[in-house]
Amino acid sequence: MDKFIIRGGIPLQGTVRISGAKNSALPCMAAAILTEEEVILENVPDVRDIETERKLLSSMGAEVELGYGRAHHRTRIRCALLSDPVAKYEIVKTMRASSLVLGPLIARTGMARVAMPGGCAIGGRPIDLHIKGLQAMGAEILQEHGYLEARAKRLRGAHIVFDKITVTGTEDLLMAAVLAEGETLMENCAREPEVTDLASLLTAMGARIEGAGTPTIRVQGVERLHGARHRINPDRIEAGTFLVAGAITGGDITLAGCNPKHLSAVVHKLRECGVQCDLTDDTVRVTSQGAVRGADISTEEYPGFPTDMQAQFMAFATQAEGTSLVTENIFENRFMHVQELVRMGANIRVDGRTATVRGKTSLSSAAVMASDLRASASLVLAALVAEGETIIDRVYHIDRGYERIEEKLRGVGAKIRRIGNVFRENEASAAQVTA
Ligand code: EPZ
């Protein structure tokens, strides 16, 4: 099981290129199910979840090539024959977002057998709203032996109002609606840029969609969709994570190839803390020399402060003067990073959905353990300022959603190494980290 060794105390300087968004690429890959023609996606990130999605689609009979045509971030998908429209538990249990194939499979083949994803570290993660919407569109869905069995001769357009705002629920039903008979009106939709990115791919494939990115989306179903080429949005959460890396280390980092318009809530909050952020159309430069002050955050659906940046901001708040209240409104268990940060010296108390962070506290290195994707990022950020060498275990969590993070961090001066076995490696090349 891979670990990171990070020596803290170095202000990060330089430029980081932001990769494509995992949470855009996953629904866009699933959208290829909707046509028998070829779909080419550019700027797909090289992360573990994308490999999992490749396995999932291939297991159904799709042709999937990552790094197509020797272009590292280009993916080619062709679902000419979906011989086995089943999302098996062995794959789904490693990635909940597998439920994104449910809507497109029913829309394309009239049937789907998808393992129930089950919960994860951050919460129960139900998909009841996906199921409710598909049933409103005429799908018959049974749940047995841990699987959803869905059937529909042809989905028909419906009026759907989401009880809660759900990102993949909006995406799943959008993909179901584009081939349904008649009009589908969806209200209380998620407005995340990943929804808009998916809608632009579907439109390029011939779908008729209005209102993506707003709470109300209207879809006129069509008989069939054709292939398309599409470039995935830059990853706003990877970008936010590196903004915090520049701020927490008192450095000067420029993010290249990002979309600052998708980062407003994070940039606004860092500026409130005294961090300088300078924006162009596709870059953000973060500099932070002086003392930074704490601020309160409350996670909300887009365009509010993203839950996927909550753990990273909390690491930053430990280095800010004063008290920061961090309130997590989206998931019921997204404070797994708190205890690990406390073990490094942070002063954090959790009371229900709110964590009170008192800064500035000096952090010291420790052996810590990653628990989920964004909690892992939070520990990396803390290790970048902790005195000494921090060892972070179970970094496979971070590999799910960050492309080559240790290389990108080394590129701006961080002392970070990935090792497979602490004992063997530590003796032989500890000097490498301290060099
Ligand atoms: C997406 O998850 C993202 N994943 C998550 O990113 C992100 O944290 C989340 O949206 C919120 O922004 C992908 O896009 C692959 P939700 P999703 O459905 O769609 C409840 C990361 O770190 N809910 O918007 O699964 C749910 O329990 C990951 O990259 C229902 O009750 O999240 C939660 O409380 C983590 N019933 C709330 O809605 C449902 O049917 C929002 O969840 C669906 C959701």
Image (cartoon, rainbow, N blue to C red):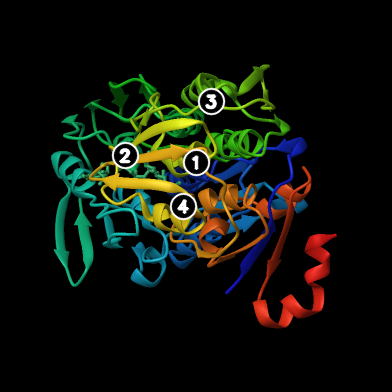
Camera-side residue of 415 and 290 = 290
- CB contact under 8 Å: marks 4 and 2: no
Give how far across and how far down residue 427 sits, in percent: 76, 79
Nearer mark to the viewer, of 4 and 1 = 1
Nearer mark to the viewer, of 1 and 3 = 1
Residue 270 badge: 3
Other-residue count near label 1 (Cα within 10 Å), few / some / many at <14 / 14–19 / ≥20 = many
Camera-side residue of 286 and 119 = 286
Going from N to C along the chain, the mark reached first, 4 or 3, is 3
Give how far across and how far down residue 429 sits, in percent: 81, 73
The CA distance from mark 2 to mark 3 is: 18 Å
- CB contact under 8 Å: marks 2 and 1: no
Find numbered disc 3 in the image and state the secondary structure of the residue it sits on.
helix
The CA distance from mark 1 to mark 3 is: 14 Å
For the residue marked with disc 1, what is the amino acid? Answer: Thr
For the residue marked with disc 2, what is the amino acid? Answer: Glu
Residue 21 seen in the current view: yes
The residue where tag 1 is placed is: 318
Residue 375 badge: 4
Q: Residue at x 44, y 61 (%)?
A: 371
The CA distance from mark 4 to mark 2 is: 13 Å
Nearer mark to the viewer, of 4 and 3 = 3
**Could you tell whether 168 is left or right of 365 in the image?**
left
Q: Residue at x 77, y 36 (%)?
A: 13
For the residue marked with disc 4, what is the amino acid? Answer: Ala
Other-residue count near label 4 (Cα within 10 Å), few / some / many at <14 / 14–19 / ≥20 = many
Residue 328 badge: 2
Find numbered disc 2 in the image and state the secondary structure of the residue it sits on.
loop
**Could you tell whether 158 is left or right of 317 in the image?**
left
Quadrant containing ligand 1 reads: top left
Locate residue 426: give its quadrant. bottom right
